[in-house]
Image (spheres, rainbow, N blue to C red):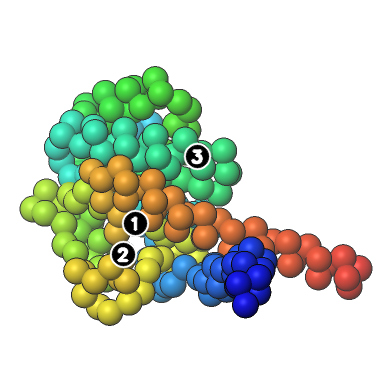
Amino acid sequence: MKKNLVLFVLFILPIVAYLFFASGVNGFIKLPVLTPKVAEFNMGKTIDNKKVQLTSKITIVGFPGANVESRKGNFFNLNQKIFKKYREFKDFQIIMFVPFGSESQVKEMTTKLAGLNDISNWYFVFASNEEIQKFYNNMKLIDKVNTEVGTTNVFIIDKERNVRGRKGHIDKDDDEYREGYNTSMVSELHNELNDDVKIVLAEYRLALKKNNADRKKYGL
């Protein structure tokens, strides 16, 4: 009896554990859509007058508000925990929507960020408070921005402009439901946001591999 128990612990239990965790990963291979097809943001431009879009990009969007300087710690956290890991992916970008009047603060902030690493696909887009609020409302989120259209949270929007997150009960205090990721909390960026960005990237990689395999199969 004792021998059988030892064999079970050494050989059978690890296999059962592996199958359990593997099934969990496969079950969560797709990050849920919270809001489908948000409208493209066509109103603002960057400080160097460049037009950026959400379509066909995996985007982390943020709303730092008018006091950009006060968010420098949040930007540093986001850069260290997320942007540095994924900036080499050509389809990945970060967009911060900021109100007109904060141009000098953004210029100073981008200089600081550029001193850490290349930020060629990290954008600060300027627009009016009303335009930013309209876009935020279009995302249909539970949490609201402050009076300066600012929040410490960032959000994931996929290539089809779907807001992605974790779906559970529609209760912002429920750990199963997550629409935003708090940039003031390093652990949240390192764990939840990092994991969820990986999942979205993996979705597109798998889709691309399947498409390429199908093309080869049918001689296309």
Residue type at numbered disc 3: Lys
Q: Is residue 24 visible?
A: yes
Q: Amino acid at mark 2?
A: Glu
Disc with the residue nearer the chain's start (2 vs 1) = 1
Q: Are marks 2 and 1 in contact (CB under 8 Å)?
A: yes
**Residue 1 lies in what quarter of the image?**
bottom right
Judge whether 87 appears above or below 163 on screen: above
Q: Nearer the viewer, residue 52 or 58?
A: 58
Q: Which residue is mark 3?
A: 85
214 relative to 44, above or below: below
Q: Residue at x 38, y 36 (%)?
A: 79
- The residue labelled by disc 2 is 179
Q: Quadrant of residue 11?
A: bottom right
Number of numbered discs present?
3
Q: Amino acid at mark 1?
A: Phe
Which residue sits at x=58%, y=44%?
Answer: 90
In this view, the residue in front, 170 or 204, is 170
**Real-space Cα separation, disc 1 to disc 3, in angstroms:** 17 Å
Q: Which mark is residue 155?
A: 1
Q: Where is residue 78 drawn, in percent x and y?
A: 35, 40
Relative to the observer, which residue lies in front, 3 or 200? 3
- Which disc number belongs to residue 4? none
Which residue lies at the image location 20% right of the left edge and 59% below the top edge? Answer: 133
- Of callouts 1 and 3, which one flags the residue occurring earlier in the amino acid sequence? 3
Give the CA separation, mark 2 to mark 1.
7 Å
Q: Earlier in the sequence, mark 3 or mark 2?
A: 3
How far apart in space, not on screen, are marks 3 and 2 (Cα)? 21 Å
Q: Mark 1: give few (<14), some (14-19) or many (20+) Cα within 10 Å.
A: many
Query: Measured from the top left, where is residue 118 in percent x and y?
Result: 48, 28
Question: Observer-nearest residue: 33 or 169?
Answer: 169
Indicate the secondary structure of the residue bearing disc 3: helix
Give the secondary structure at mark 1: strand
